[in-house]
Image (cartoon, rainbow, N blue to C red):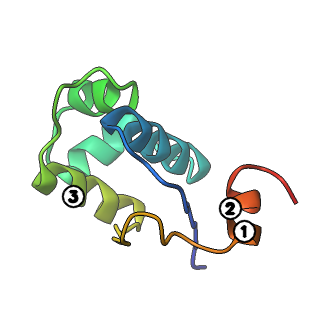
């Protein structure tokens, strides 16, 4: 069974990124300690990242956590994130 989770959001802060990682982890029903162990970081660091309590979170750590969750990062030029319909769906509207 393949789990496909798509989080399409414009994230401008490390806190928003941590919250998205937390939501994805919870949706996959994975424990912080298990994700942290597989990513090679401490559970405390993952906890602090998910809560927005870190000043920085290195690219290697982020990519390792995302790999455990089966996620990836996509870059788009600012202001070109999508159509009006996509923005409405992103904001919870229909």
Q: Is residue 73 above or below residue 61?
A: below
- Where is residue 52, by image quadrant? top left
Residue drawn at the location 75% of the way across and 61% of the way down: 89
Label drawn at residue 84: 1
The kind of secondary structure element at disc 2 is: helix
Q: Residue under circle 3? A: 64
In the rendered image, which quarter contains the N terminus? bottom right
Residue at the far bottom: name it: 1
* Residue placed most toward the observer, 1 or 75: 75
Disc 1 and disc 3: Cα gap in Å? 33 Å
Kindly report which numbered mark, 2 or 3, lies closer to the viewer in this rendering.
Answer: 2
State the quadrant of the C terminus. bottom right
Q: Residue furthest right?
A: 94
Q: Nearer the viewer, residue 91 or 22?
A: 91
Q: Is residue 47 above or below residue 5?
A: above
Q: Where does the image place residue 19, in percent across and percent down from the top left?
A: 47, 37
Q: Is residue 39 above or below residue 22?
A: below
Q: Label 1's element?
A: helix
Residue 2 position, x and y percent, is 57, 78
Residue appearing at x 60%, y 49% in the figure:
27
Q: What is the CA distance from the residue labelled 1 to the residue labelled 2?
A: 5 Å
* Mark earlier in primary sequence (1, 3): 3
Q: For mark 2, what is the residue?
A: 87
């Amino acid at each position: 069974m393949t789990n496909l989770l798509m989080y399409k959001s414009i994230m401008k802060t490390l806190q928003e990124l941590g919250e998205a990682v937390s939501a994805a982890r919870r949706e996959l029903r994975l424990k912080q300690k298990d994700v942290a162990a597989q990513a090679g970081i401490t559970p405390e660091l993952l906890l602090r990242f998910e809560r927005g309590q870190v000043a920085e979170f290195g690219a290697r750590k982020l990519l390792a956590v995302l790999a455990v969750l089966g996620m990836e990062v996509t870059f788009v030029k600012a202001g070109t994130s999508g159509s009006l319909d996509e923005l409405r769906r992103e904001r919870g509207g229909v």
